[in-house]
Image (cartoon, grey):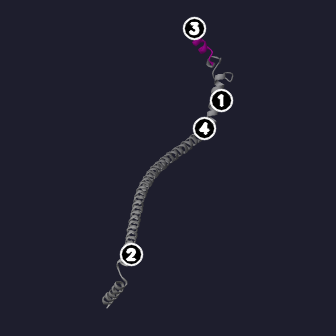
Amino acid sequence: MKKLSILAVLAASPAMAATGPFLSLSNTNFIVTLAFLIFMGILLYAKVPGRVLGMLDKRSVQIRTELEEARALREEARTILASYDRKQKEVQEQAARIVASARDEAQAAAEQAKADLRASIARRLAAAEDQIASAEAGAVRAIREQAVSVAVAAAADLLSRQMTPAAASASIDESIKEVEARFH
């Protein structure tokens, strides 16, 4: 079956359709060949192949230029990308340094606040101890004054009971003489 279909295709080709002498105007093969040669002659006379080749050369130069521009743009884009990557890394490092610095400053401030609080507590304790000591000294002084007052009152009472008016007058005179002797 395959052989038969191949034979039918070869038998039905246009080359087999033409009959008669080849150089006759009734031969379609001759007419087609003649038209083709005239067409090719017109194309060559009009320098179409040169123009087509020139256009193709111009297009290839344009494509080459565009490719070079694309390569240059790609390299520039890579350079810019690398620059942005580098800047991004620098910014990230700077942000990390800022965060670390802020953390250190916060920790130092917290430690300073603790130290200030301890110092304030120590000052308040010292002030409270001073107040307690002052109050204690005041209480001791008040007790001594009270004791002296009581002792003076008791001595005065005792002296007033034991001393006669003549002895009191003599004691006063003796005290005046003693004071005069001390001041002179």
The CA span between labels 3 and 1 is 38 Å
**Predominant SS along the magenta part:** helix
Residue 35 is labelled as 1
- Dot 4 lies on which element? helix
- The numbered mark, 4 or 3, whose residue comes first in the sequence reads 3
What residue does disc 2 label? 157
Q: Counting residues from the N terminus, which is met first, the one under dot 3 or under dot 1? A: 3
Q: Nearer the viewer, mark 1 or mark 2?
A: 2
Where residue 10 appears, as percent x and y from the top left, is 59, 15
Mark 3: secondary structure: loop
Q: State left or right for residue 143 relative to residue 2.
A: left
Between 4 and 93, the one lying in front of the other is: 93
Residue on which disc 3 sits:
1
Q: Which residue is mark 4?
A: 44
Residue type, mark 2 in image: Asp
Of the image marks 1 and 2, the number of the one nearer the N terminus: 1
